[in-house]
Image (cartoon, grey):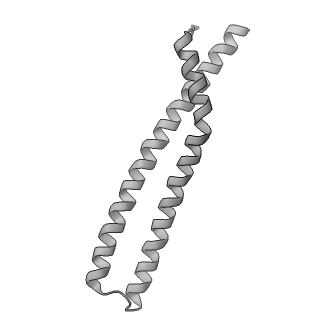
Amino acid sequence: MSRFFDKKDNDFYKKVKKKLPSQKKQMKTYERQLNQILNIIEEGREEFKNGIMTEFEYAGFLRDSKKLMYDIKIDIKAFKDHIDVIEDFIYLYEESRLRILD
């Protein structure tokens, strides 16, 4: 069962194929942000252990940093799902084009 893509599909293919590398780069940025937050949380934990931060300050710090971490994890998941869909489309489009040429 071969499916022929129309002009709109071809235009979309060209557009997403061109944008995919920058989207993967953005994904790495989100992952670096998550790692930075994990490092900051660890630094806060050390400051609390060393008495630099009070228990009240530490509780607020944890609340805020965990909320930020949760938000970034949601962004990463959504963006990864988006990239997966785009990669699937590119793969299927290219496979379809190869079948037509055979």
Q: In this view, does 50 lie above or below 16?
A: below
Eyeballing the image, is 32 above or below 5?
Answer: below
Residue 46, percent from left and from top: 44, 84
Asked if 76 appears above or below 33 in the picture, the reply is above
The residue lying at 50 percent from left, 53 percent from top is: 30
Q: Residue at x 41, y 79 (%)?
A: 44
Q: Which residue lies furthest to the right in this view?
A: 102
Q: Quadrant of residue 48?
A: bottom left
Report the label total: 0
**Residue located at (42% from left, 73% from top):** 41
Residue 100, given in percent of the width and then of the height, sits at 67, 8
- Residue 78 in percent (x, y) is at 42, 42
Q: x, y (%) of residue 28?
A: 56, 52
- In the rendered image, the quadrant that contains the C terminus is top right
Which residue lies most toward the bottom here? 51
Location of the N terminus (image quadrant): top right
* Residue located farthest toward the left when viewing the structure as drawn: 56
Q: Nearer the viewer, residue 13 or 76?
A: 13
